[in-house]
Image: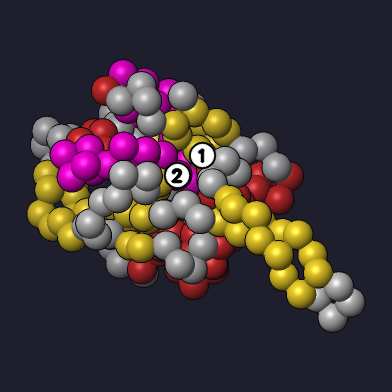
Amino acid sequence: MHEEIHHPCVQHKLSLIRDINTGHKKFRELATEITMFVCYEALKEVRVEDVTVQTPVAEAKCRKIVEDIVVVPILRAGVGMLEGILDLVPTARVGFLGMYRDEVTAQPVAYYQKLPPQTATALNIIIDPMLATGGSTAAAIDVLKEAGAKKIVVVCIVTCPEGLQAVETAHPDVKIYTASIDDRLNENKYIVPGLGDAGDRLFGTR
């Protein structure tokens, strides 16, 4: 299952973040803003409870989020999306998964894992700007399920049909939210047209 967010503000910001002339400072800001829009959709079905608050005029019946939310960025590029989702749900707990793609085999290699304890009803949100081959994302889902996660969604900025198919085949119970489903992967396993190397563009490295 997947959902592509077509909101005009998201599409406008995508045009800016894709631009080769966008520097790392602006790239980080845009990644945060796009993440907020996409996560807004990903969080639309979180559990809430009825509460009553006192306004300056009268009591008001309201709703507050009661879902236990765990955000899991895939290092290193996923960190560039963390601020965006924590702005929406600042009480979320945060775990980290370190993975990189072997340049020869294109397979994910894990090098770091630090996750908060799972609860029975926790909603786990994996964040990574690029869902390309889908290998790292599928591996991250494997790790979370092994840790006891029952509810998992994935949020990315751009993906492609090959990556979606790989993740959905391995984990049909996990929904993917993205700002764009791009055309394809090239021979180097980069998304076309994509963003380039999101980690380098986020942090000004090469």
Of callouts 1 and 2, which one flags the residue occurring earlier in the amino acid sequence?
A: 2
Could one spot residue 131 in this view of the protein? Answer: no
Name the residue tied to disc 1: 178
Give the amino acid at mark 1. Thr
Q: Which mark is residue 199?
A: none
- Can you say whether 115 is above or below 25 in the image? above
Marks 1 and 2: CB-CB under 8 Å? Answer: yes
Q: Is residue 178 visible?
A: yes
**Figure disc tally:** 2
Q: Residue at x 55, y 31 (%)?
A: 3
Mark 2 packing: few (<14 Cα in 10 Å), some, or many (20+)?
many
At x 76%, y 75%, the residue is 54
CA–CA distance between discs 1 and 2? Answer: 6 Å
| Drawn side of residue 100 relative to residue 48, left or right | left
Q: Quadrant of the C terminus?
A: bottom left
Name the secondary structure under disc 1.
strand
- Which quadrant of the structure image shows residue 108? top left
Q: Residue 103 in the image: x percent, y percent?
A: 15, 41
- In percent of the image, x 36 and y 68: which residue is there? 203
Q: Position of residue 55 (x, y in %)?
A: 80, 75
Q: Is residue 155 magenta?
A: yes
Residue 152, quarter of picture = top left
Helix, strand or loop at label 2? It is strand
Residue 6 within the magenta-colored segment of the rendering: no
Q: Residue furthest right?
A: 57
Towards the viewer: 63 or 45: 63
Give, as a single range, the part of the protein colored magenta. 143-169
Q: Which residue is mark 2?
A: 155
